[in-house]
Amino acid sequence: MVPLYWYLWLGGVVFAIGVFGFLARRNIIIMFLSIELMLNGVNISLVALSHYMQDLRGQILVFFIIAVAAAEAAIGLAIIIAMFRNRDTLHADEMAEMKG
Amino acid sequence: MVEWFFGYLAGAVILLAILVVASRNPVHSVLWMLLMFLHVAGLYLLLNAEFLAATQVIVYAGAILVLFLFVVMLLNLREEIKIRRFTGGWLFKGLTALGIIYVLRRGLEGFRVGFEGPWSIEAVGRATHTRALGQVLFTEYILPFEIASLLLLVAIVGAVFLSKKRLR
Amino acid sequence: MNEINVSMLAPLLPEVIMASAGILVLLVELVARRKETAGLLSIAAVAVAAYYVPHSFGKSFGGMFVSDGYSAFFKFIFFINLILTVLLSMRYLVIEKSNHGEYYSLVVFSTLGMMLMASAGDLIVLYLGLELMALSSYVLAGFIRHDARSSEAAVKYFLLGAFSSALLLYGITLVYGLTGTTDVSLIGAAVVEKGLSTPLFLSVVFLMAAFGFKTALAPFHMWAPDVYEGAPTSVTAFMSVGPKAAAFAAFGRVFLTGFGSLSTDWTGILVVLSILTMAVGNILAIQQDNIKRMLAYSSVAHAGYAVLGIIVGGAEGLAAMMNYLFIYGFMNLGAFAVVIMLRSEGVRGEALEDYKGLAKTHPFAAAVMLVFMFSLTGIPPTAGFIGKFYLFKAVVGAGYAWLAVVTVIFSAISAYFYLRVVMYMYMLEPEGEAVTLSLSPSLGLALLITTLVVILIGVYPSPLLSFARLAAG
C-alpha cells in the first residue's frame, strides 16, 4: 500500500514545477502549459485524497477541472492566435505596448 | 510491487514535468507533456479511477494537447530555439518553487484525511467506477454539471469569435 | 438527496432567467440588423431577473446554492454593472469598429457567473461560477480583435486568471482533504471541530492568494494596470466593478463562514495585504498620465479599502464592505463613462492632457467628472464619503483605530491624483484642438443615472445603509 503522503507530495512537486515554469519562462505557450502542469498536480492530489477517503466527490471535482481545462484551452489559444495576428511575438516580456 | 510501480510513475512524471518547463523547443515541451499525461493516467489507474484515467487520455492528451500543437505551429521555431528561454532572475524563481516544495513537504507530512466515505474500493468495484461516478455526478452534482455546460458554450462562442478570420 | 425535480430550481430563478437570456441574446444577434437590439434585450432580461431576486430566497441542491440577503445584495451590484456597461458600450463599440452582438451575450454570461459565485454554498459551484465569469471576461478583454493593445490585455488577463484559479484549486484540494467536504458551512463546522493545523493554514494561504488575484490586492495586483489599460474601455469599466465585487462576495463567504473560527490567524495577513494594497494603488496612481491606467491603480486602492470589511468581519464589517462596493460601482462606472465620452473617431482621449481646459470647452462633461473625482476621493456630500465613513466606523468599532488612521492618510494621498484631473479641467487652458465628445442617448442616460445616484446617496444614504445592514444579516 502506497502511503497517501507520497501522492500528495508528488502532486505538490508537479504543482511547484508548474509555478516555476509559469514564473520563469518567456514563451506564452509554455507558460500556459505550466498552468496545465499545476492543474495536473491538483488532480493527482484530488484523486489520491478521494481514493483514501473512500469518497467520490474529489474525483467529481477532477472531472470538472478537466472540463474547465478544455474550455480554458480553447479560449486561451484563441486569444493567443488573436494576439499573434496583431503582433508577431509570443514572448511575455516583449509586449511593449504597455509597461510599468 | 505496487510501490515499485508507483515509484516508476512518480519518477517519470516529475522528470517529464521538468522537461516540459525546461525544453528549448515548444514542440518538445508539448510532446513531453503528452507523455506526462499518459503517466498521470497510470497513476489514476493505481488509484482505482479508471474513468478518470480514460478521460485524462481522451480529453487532456487527445483534445487539449492537439490544440496546443496546432498553435505551436504558428511559432517561428528557428528563432525560438536561438533566443533566451527564461526571464531574468529565473534562479530566484527556481528557489521560490523549491521553497513551495519544501513548505508542502513539511506541511503535508502526516496528512490525515478528515473523512471516511461510503465508496470503498469494493463498493466502487460492485457498481463499476463509471456508474458510481455517474450516480454521484447526476444526482448530487447536477447543478455544477449544468454550469459546466454553459461554460463550454461560452468557450465555443469566445473561441470562434476571437479566431475567426472575417466577421460579418 | 437522490430525487431531482423542477422545484429545486425555484431559488435559482434569476439565474435561470439570465442563462436563457444569454442564449436568447446570442440567437437574436444573428437576425437583428441593429446589434443594439441585443443590448436592449439583455437589459430587459436583467430587469426581469432583478424582480425575482427578492422572491427567490432559499437553499437548493443540498446547500450548494444559497440565495440569501447577502447574495441578493451582490446580485443587485452585478445587475447595475451590467445595465450601465451595456449603456456605455452601445456607441463605443461602433467607434471601435467592433460592434458584434456576441459582446452582449458574453456580458450576460459573465454576470451569470458572478451571480453563481455570490450564491455558491459549495466550493465546486464557486469554482465553476468563477470560471464562467472569467472565461467570458477574457474574451471581452480581447474584444477589439484588430487592436494589439486589446489582445495583449486579453493574454495577460487570461494567463494571470488561469494561474490564480490553479492556486484556488490547490487550496480547495487541501480543504477537501482535511474536512472531507466542499460545502462551505460544513467546512466551517469541521474547522471549528479540528482547529488549526499546518495543512489547513497552507490552504488558507492558497485561497487568500487566489482571491487576492481576483480582487487585485497587492502584491497580486500587477496584472490589473496593464489589463485595465489595454482592454476596451467599456470592458474595463465592467471588469473593475463586477468581477471584483463577485470575488469579494466569495471571499467574504468562504473566509467568514468557512474559516470564521480561525479569523485571529488570518486577519493579520489580511491587514498587511490591505495596507500594502492601499500604498501601492495610491502611490503608483500618482505617476500615471493615462487616465485609464490611473483609474486602474485607483481601483486597486479601492480593493484595499473594501477588504477592511472582511478584516472587521461579522455583519457590521460585511455591511460596510457591501455598501462600499455598491457605491464604488456607481462612481467608477461613471468615471469610465466620461472617459468613453472623450473617445471619438481617431481620438483616444485617454491621456490626462486631453482633459486640459475641459471646463471651458465642455463645462457639462467637466462638471460630471468633477462629481466622480470628488466621490472617488471621498469628499462630502458625495457617495464616496458615505462609503468610506461607514467603513471607518466599522474599522474603529472593531478596535483597529490605527488602521483607520492609516486608511485616512492614504485617502489623503489619493486626493492628489484625483484632484489633479479636476485641476487639469478647471485651471488649465485647452491646448490644440478641442476634444469632441461622442455623446449618445444611452451614454447620456448612464451618466445621468450614475451622477444622480452618487449625489443622492451622498445626501440621503439611509435607505442604502439599512438595505446593506439587512442583507448582511
Image: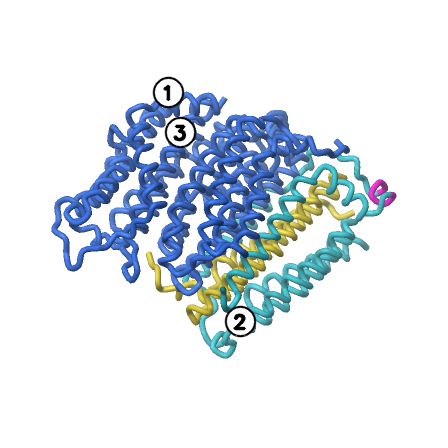
Q: Is residue C258 visible?
A: yes
Q: Closest to the observer: A86 or C444?
A: C444
Q: Amino acid at mark 1?
A: Gly
Foreground disc of the pair 3, 2: 3
- Magenta highlight: main SS: helix
List the residue tagged with mark 2.
B24
Examine the rendered structure and indicate whether residue C89 appears above or below residue C327.
below
Query: Which residue position holds label 1?
Result: C397
Query: What amino acid type is highlighted by mark number 2?
Result: Arg
The residues tagged by marks 1 and 3 sit, at their Cα atoms, a distance apart of 16 Å
Rendered image quadrant of residue B89: bottom left
Q: Position of residue C294 (x, y in %)?
A: 30, 48
Secondary element at image label 1: helix
Circle nearer the N terminus (1, 3): 3
Q: Are marks 3 and 2 in contact (CB under 8 Å)?
A: no
Residue B95 visible in image: no
Q: Which residue is mark 3?
A: C323
Q: Which residues are magenta?
A: B122-126
